[in-house]
């Protein structure tokens, strides 16, 4: 059995990040008995301006990529199909609005102290892609906390303070300085970068090769 660390740089508002992690889970299940992985989530913001006016996601993507609505909706439909096949809830993905995710990242860091980091991240993915909820809204965040099996009263204290603010900022800066400019990014054992939401078969082979080198 080879132990690996997997640092995942991602944003709550990134659909490929949710898909990428679901594919990683499949790969790790296929490698059971060969590889044991310790996963840690790291912050990245696709919409870092907290003052930015929330915009319907289709309109925002049309502006960002210079595409028309038909093209954007087709691309979103493809993602919904892929996500559904992985057991993810992307039901209301096309109805969401752009959102600042900084407070969500603070809660993910807080959840890590309770060994519920992945559960917190997945609850936020569900709220945003499954229910098109505003993941910058405190009530939405606290609902996700409860969904992750965590204490909402404690989380509310975190949100009412500046706890984890410096930690998230330092985390973002660290990975940007390391050259991460798009997400998801999977950094294996601090040495190997896998960019994007790769297919499970690719991840199985890549992790197997890295584990063999480590051994």
Image (tube, rainbow, N blue to C red):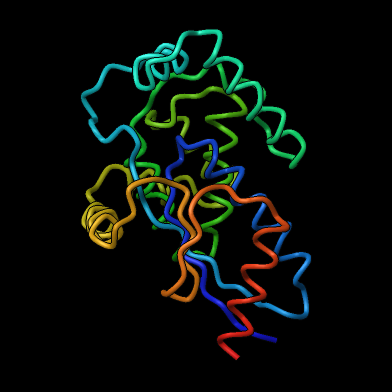
Residue 173 x/y as whole percent: 23, 56
Relative image position of residue 97 (x, y in whole percent): 43, 19
Q: Residue at x 50, y 19 (%)?
A: 96
Location of the N terminus by quadrant is bottom right
Residue extending furthest toward the top: 69
From this view, report whether residue 53 is shown above or below residue 109.
above
Tell me if 160 is positioned left or right of 211 in this view.
left
Q: From the image, which quarter does the C terminus lie in?
A: bottom right
Could you tell whether 36 is left or right of 47 in the image? right
Residue 185 visible to the viewer: yes
Quadrant in which residue 31 is drawn: bottom right
* Left or right: residue 84 compared with residue 54: right
State the residue at coordinates (58%, 45%).
122
Q: Is residue 145 above or below residue 113?
A: above
Let me know if residue 111 appears in the view: no
Residue 49 placement (x, y as % from top left): 23, 31
Does 79 sit above or below residue 24?
above
Q: Position of residue 65 (x, y in %)?
A: 38, 21
Q: Nearer the viewer, residue 129 or 116?
A: 129
Q: Which residue occupies the foreground of this view, 164 or 146?
A: 164
Asked whether 69 or 174 is in front, the reply is 69
Name above or below for residue 79 compared with residue 74: below
């Amino acid at each position: 059995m080879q132990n690996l660390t997997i640092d995942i740089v991602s944003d709550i508002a990134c659909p490929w990040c949710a898909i990428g992690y679901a594919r990683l889970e499949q790969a790790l299940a296929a490698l059971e008995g060969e590889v044991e992985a310790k996963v840690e989530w790291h912050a990245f913001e696709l919409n870092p301006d907290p003052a930015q006016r929330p915009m319907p996601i289709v309109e925002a993507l049309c502006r960002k990529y210079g595409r028309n609505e038909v093209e954007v909706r087709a691309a979103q439909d493809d993602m919904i199909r892929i996500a559904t096949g992985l057991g993810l809830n992307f039901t209301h993905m096309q109805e969401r609005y752009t959102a600042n995710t900084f407070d969500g990242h603070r809660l993910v860091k807080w959840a890590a102290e309770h060994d519920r980091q992945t559960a917190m991240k997945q609850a936020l993915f569900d709220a945003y892609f499954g229910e098109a909820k505003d993941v910058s809204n405190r009530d939405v965040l606290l609902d996700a906390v409860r969904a992750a099996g965590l204490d909402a009263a404690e989380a509310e204290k975190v949100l009412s303070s500046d706890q984890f603010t410096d930690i998230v900022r330092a985390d973002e800066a660290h990975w940007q300085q390391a050259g991460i400019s798009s997400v998801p990014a999977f950094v294996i054992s601090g040495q190997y970068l896998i960019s994007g939401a790769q297919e499970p078969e690719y991840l199985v082979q890549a992790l197997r090769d890295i584990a063999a080198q480590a051994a």
